[in-house]
Image (spheres, rainbow, N blue to C red):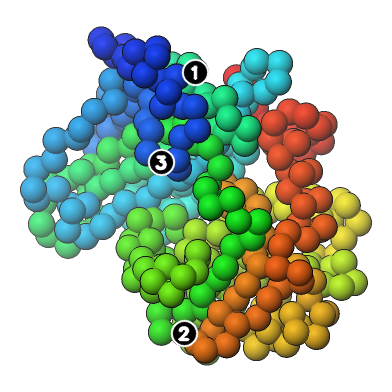
Amino acid sequence: MSAPAFALLPHPAPVADDVRAAAIADPAFGRVFTDHMVSIRFSGAKGWHDAQVMPRGPLSLDPATAVLHYAQEIFEGLKAYRLDDGSMALFRVEANAARFNASARRMAMAELPEELFIAAVKEIVRVDANWFPKVAGGALYLRPFMYASEVFLGVKPSAEYHFLVIASPVGNYFKSGAPAVSLWVSEDYTRAAPGGTGAAKCGGNYAASLVAQSEAIAKGHDQVVFLDAAEHRWIEELGGMNMFFVFEDGSLVTPPLTGTILPGITRDAIITLAKDAGLTVREERYAIDQWQADAESGRLTESFACGTAAVVTPVGKVTRGETSFTIGAGGPGQTTAMLKDKLVAIQRGQAPDPYGWVMRL
Ligand SMILES: *Cc1c(COP(=O)(O)O)cnc(C)c1O
């Protein structure tokens, strides 16, 4: 089946220049959206069809639309950057396209040809190229997603799907200005179990994590650390970011991809960059008690979380029940900063890209 060409339906009344300029001056994460969206439909009979770049607007859904009942929905998140020379670039979009299909398979959804995913992402960036924020650290955050659109209440995989891409200018993810985040270890809730959907980027995983996140916020922390479902002992990840631990001897540990954590593209990039900087990276389980003991003894010097939205975020403090421990000096450490700088320099076209991660548009 050949990929359909996109019909362009330009927005008849795009946001006025002065209003857009104010909106993108320093946008909060995920609050401001561009003028357009991409929409592609799937049905068993027609395959992928009706590809459009169209004015962004509400969707009209029948109340019996399958996703509203059984949560068959997946998404991706990636950023487009405006480089110093004025050109635009995407970071590792092929990896997002491949992961989207891995998620689709796990959720028994139709797979989207990878070249169609990439074409859709390029379309939205090109049509809304005037929405890049000027703020330092800013980017155009892209959210491809797909939901089960069949109107049917039977419990089975939907026969129809709707794929969309929306775009949102973003500044820095954590607005607090704090140098490091404070984490709450969830001892009551788990995010994912063996055989479950933890490795799929599906909305349902987030729905299940929100009660723990609310608990963390209510107790004055920024994010939750989830432990494994079986033993409540091994560190898995945050609600939407992977974890790294840095030791005195310069080595790093990150939890392995055993099916219960999300295979982050930032995680993968950090592993590559750390190894190429001469550091040892071990993908192995790390226990919560060990984390505390190592932080207290000084064997562990830094910890950070990573993901597309917040890039690399140092961890300053961890709380479990009534006890807390501080990581290093409680602020960003040297290895964390070095890896973040290397990653950001490649993403922004300010350093050579020996890995072929950056796709210029
Ligand atoms: C998206 C996501 C990440 C980070 O993945 P990146 O590809 O680095 O953005 C980590 N954990 C979860 C649960 C996620 O959904």
Left or right side of 112 for 315: right
Q: CA distance from mark 1 to mark 2?
A: 44 Å
Tally the marks: 3
Q: CA distance from mark 1 to mark 3?
A: 17 Å
Is the CB–ligand 1 distance for label 3 below 8 Å? no
- Residue located at (53% from left, 52% from top): 176
Q: Which residue is mark 2?
A: 187
Q: Please tell me whether mark 2 sits on a helix, a strand or a loop.
A: loop
Mark 1 and mark 2 residues within 8 Å of each other at the beta carbon: no
Q: Which residue is mark 1?
A: 129
Q: Residue 226 at x, y = what percent?
A: 50, 74
Observer-nearest residue: 56 or 201?
Answer: 56
Q: CA distance from mark 3 to mark 2?
A: 29 Å
Observer-nearest residue: 226 or 91?
Answer: 226
Marked residue nearer the N-terminal end (3 or 2):
3
Q: Amino acid at mark 1?
A: Ala
- Residue located at (22% from left, 52% from top): 67
Q: Which residue is mark 3?
A: 30
Query: Marks 1 and 3: which is nearer the front?
Result: 3
Q: Please tell me whether mark 1 sits on a helix, a strand or a loop.
A: helix
Marked residue nearer the N-terminal end (1 or 2):
1
Q: Amino acid at mark 3?
A: Gly
Q: Quadrant of the C terminus?
A: top right
Identify the mark at residue 351; answer none if there is no mark: none
Q: Quadrant of residue 352?
A: top right
Left or right side of 307 for 208: left
Left or right side of 21 for 257: right
Can residue 246 be seen by looking at this rendering?
yes
Q: Quadrant of residue 217?
A: bottom left
Mark 3 and mark 2 residues within 8 Å of each other at the beta carbon: no
